[in-house]
Amino acid sequence: MPEPSPAHRPVFDLGAIGAALQELSAQWAAGKSFGAGASGDPEEVARHMLEGYAYVDGLLARDLDPFVYGGSRLLLEMNHQVLCGAGTRRRAEFARHLAATERRFYDDHQCGADAFYAMVARSRHLKPIPFAARIYRQIVEAPQLFIEGNQRTATLVASFVLGRAGLPPMVPTAKTFGALSVLSATCKAMDRRWFLSMAWGWMLDLQMQNFIMRTAQADFLADKAALPPPSVPPAATSSATGAPGQASASQRSPGHPWANNSQARKTPAHKTWTGRSRADHAFTDNTWGRGAPAG
């Protein structure tokens, strides 16, 4: 099914999303246990998540894509949003942490941007829900993409994939957060470098697809038109049991477009990650536009 054009794409209902997050944070603050995935100040986490959904909604409205040439800054910003929100005060307070997050994201080739965008290239053929499920797993499983806030960031990135296809965003609610935490803990317990990680990852992808389809709520879209009920894939089983200010644009050389957001809009197909060989990018300081000397 073709994706809706940006002009007709449903946008998120931030009021409904905010109400769901507030209900979750209220129960969390009241002492209800949601498992290991619940940490931090409930109200602050809910506020930053809502600002993150607003940011993703803005990307959809402006037809910006974090998965193409020049879009890596958009992905990094989603992590900054869930950690610090959109304001400048907390970003300044956690500037060192955000700088360390950025260095790891661009420089760690095993778990950072290199590994993530290689997975994106391999998964381009997937339909939106399987792609969103795989994106979520890749961010949360070990080694994780970011230093902190991986589950929340993965939720936003998956919501971008779903929203771009006209589907409801992935929103943790008081009813669904416990199940999502269990899935996330299982993902985190898996290391993609293990010998059997491919088979285990496939089972986790099916479980995540099942979760996305079972918990989808059209109320979280501004367009309340009823969506056809999705067919739920067979439940997968696993024996497994079961992770902050934004750097200014002037700090990054404009000559390296992997980090140039202007390149993320309507990028020609030959300039996406899939159009360039892995050898052109891996293990170089300038792979994602980092640290090129001026002049």
Image (cartoon, helix red, strand yellow):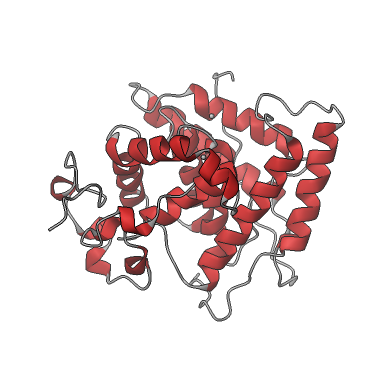
Residue drawn at 52 percent across, 44 percent down: 92
Q: For the view shown, which residue lies furthest in the right direction?
A: 30
Please give the count of numbered marks on the rendered protein.
0
Percent from the top left, x then y, of residue 130? 50, 49
Residue 164 placement, left or right of 101: right
Q: Please determine whether, in this image, residue 188 is positioned above or below residue 21.
A: above
**Of 94 and 178, the residue lying toward us:** 94
Q: For the view shown, which residue lies furthest in the bottom direction?
A: 7
The quarter in which the C terminus is drawn is bottom left
Percent from the top left, x then y, of residue 248? 39, 55
Percent from the top left, x then y, of residue 258? 28, 56
Residue 290 placement, left or right of 83: left
Q: Please determine whether, in this image, residue 94 is positioned above or below residue 230.
A: above
**Of 217 and 77, the residue lying toward us:** 77
**Of 192 and 244, the residue lying toward us:** 244
Residue drawn at 49 percent across, 46 percent down: 245
Residue drawn at 71 percent across, 25 percent down: 35
